[in-house]
Amino acid sequence: ADMINGLSKQSFPPCMQNLHRGLKEEHHLKHWGRLQYGLFLKGIGLSLEEALRFWKSEFTKAADMDGEKFDRQHSYNIRYNYGKEGKRADYTPFSCIKIITTNAPGVGHYHGCPFRHSDADLIEQKMNKMSFPKDKQTKVMEYIKGSHYQLACREYFKAAHKTEEEIDLMHPNQYYEESQRLIN
Ligand code: SF4
């Protein structure tokens, strides 16, 4: 849990960076955000105990949430995601296609795919801030315009990791794993 901040900057795809930022700013995420981010974190190896610690430490920074209320309102759903409650199914992290095509985010939501659901200007601003080369930025924007969101993400990955290696991006957890492979 203590490594998530650093890893999010280093290796999380833009969708999960958004969720992490939203959680840090609001000390809360709505249902689909908790699900998308919680299952992603499970997929990168966060254990149930660490997940409970991570979510509790963030949520209880909000003025209206204490540890007891958190345990009452949220720990069941976290245990559920890990197959410890309800149907006891081992839920897997969402793929890019699922994130892109279902449950579009509304106002105050942080889930979804930024290439599909965010204002393209915001992505351009972020790429400028990260000093991505102009040709890479142009490619990302062209893919967004053509509704090729995963290809836009792949170009983004290449620019963020200063690589020309092509990855066939299908899943946010794959983005993370490829990033870790290149970094370590
Ligand atoms: Fe996340 Fe996939 Fe969208 Fe990239 S293409 S931001 S990994 S959902």
Image (tube, rainbow, N blue to C red):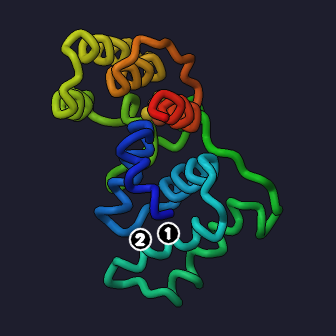
Say which element carries label 1: helix
Identify which residue, 18 or 117, lies in the foreground.
18
Callout 1 amino acid: Trp
Q: Residue furthest bottom?
A: 68
In this view, the residue in front, 59 or 119, is: 59
Q: Position of residue 87 (x, y in %)?
A: 82, 62
On screen, 113 above or below 87? above
| Residue 101 shows in the view | no
Residue at the image position 71 percent from the left and 61 percent from the top: 82
**Cα distance, mark 2 to mark 1?**
5 Å
For ligand 1, tell me if the residue under mark 2 lies within 8 Å.
no
Residue 37 location (% of width, % of height)? 51, 52
Residue at horizontal 57%, vertical 74%?
74
Residue located beneath label 1 in the image = 55
- Asked which secondary structure carries label 2, the reply is helix
Q: Quadrant of residue 73?
A: bottom right
Q: Are marks 2 and 1 in contact (CB under 8 Å)?
A: yes
Neighbours of disc 1 within 10 Å: few (<14), some (14-19), many (20+)? many
- The structure residue drawn at horizontal position 32% and vertical position 66%, both measured from the top left corner, is 26
- Residue 183 in sight: yes
Crowd rating for badge 2 (residues with CA inside 10 Å; few <14, some 14–19, many 20+): some
In the rendered view, tell whether residue 85 sits above or below residue 137.
below
What x and y, as percent, mark residue 45? 63, 52
Residue at 58% over, 83% down: 71
Provide the residue designation for mark 2. 58
When asked about the image quadrant of residue 177, the answer is top right
Q: Residue 83 — which label?
A: none
- Residue 154 is situated, as x and y percent measured from the top left of the image, at 44, 20
